[in-house]
Structure formats: structure tokens, C-alpha cells
Image (spheres, grey):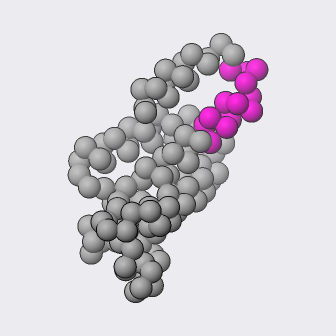
Amino acid sequence: LDKLGAIEWNKIVHRHQGWRLITCIWLHAGLVHLAANMLGLVFIGIRLEQQFGFVQIGIIYLVSGFGGSVLSTLFIRNSICVGASGALFGLLGAMLSELVTNWTIYTNKVSYHLIKLINYV
């Protein structure tokens, strides 16, 4: 994983390998890790893509994945990090923001979204 672009503090800061902040989003630590992230992406991403389109969701995914990578780099300095969890939490935040913004539309579906959120977390 380290050779493929996982986040590692020394390589990003001292060797100026900033590209690792993006490539780590598409690396995973195993099949269970990959399956969990893909399941989350299916449940959250498909619904948001139908509402906002693939371009906006792609931008949210990349920006939040980059932000998650930066935070991982700052707070986890002694190991490598991979995965799309930061990007998925960004999509989850977008979904919750959309739910709060359009609360009157979803009054009948609130329990559905809460159950979906609890199942994901």
C-alpha cells in the first residue's frame, strides 16, 4: 500500500509527495474495508446522484476525500492510512444537509433516513 500511494506523514511532508492525499482514497486495506466503503457509497451516493447529478457528487466526493486525507495526515503520523471514509463522510454530510434543508418534503421519510443512517454507522 505504501508503494501505491497510501498516506504517510514523512513522505507527504518531507518528500513532497502530495499526490498521496488523493491516491489513498482509492486504496483499501482489504476486502472487508473495500466492501464496507462500497456499500456506504451505494446507499448514500446513488440517492444523492439522483438528486444532484454525478458532477456535483463527484466534486463533493473528491473534496471531502482530500479533506479527510489532510486530517489523517495531521493526526496520524506513525502509520499509513488508506480508504474512502473521509469521502463517504462528506457524502453523508451532504445527505444530512439536504435532509435538514428540505425538512418539510421529507417529514414522512424521516424515519426511513434515520434507520438508513443508523445502519450505516
Could you say where residue 96 lies in the image, as x and y percent from the top left?
62, 35
Quarter of the C terminus within the rendering: top left
Quarter of the N terminus within the rendering: bottom left
Residue lying at 45% horizontally and 42% vertically, measured from the top left: 41
User: In the displayed structure, does residue 48 sit left or right of residue 101?
Assistant: left
Residue lying at 39% horizontally and 63% vertically, measured from the top left: 76
Q: Is residue 5 above or below residue 42?
A: below
Residue 97 sits in which quadrant?
Answer: top right
- State the residue in front, 58 or 71: 71
Residue 6 sits in which quadrant?
Answer: bottom left
Q: Is residue 25 magenta?
A: no
Q: Can residue 58 be seen in this snapshot? A: no
Please identify the dominant SS of the magenta region. Answer: helix
Q: Can residue 120 be seen in this snapshot? A: yes
User: In the displayed structure, does residue 35 sit left or right of residue 64?
Assistant: left
User: In the displayed structure, does residue 91 sit left or right of residue 43?
Assistant: right
Residue lying at 42% horizontally and 26% vertically, measured from the top left: 119
- Could you tell me how many numbered marks the image carries? 0
- State the residue in front, 101 or 41: 101
Magenta residues, start to end: 94-106
Q: Is residue 103 magenta?
A: yes
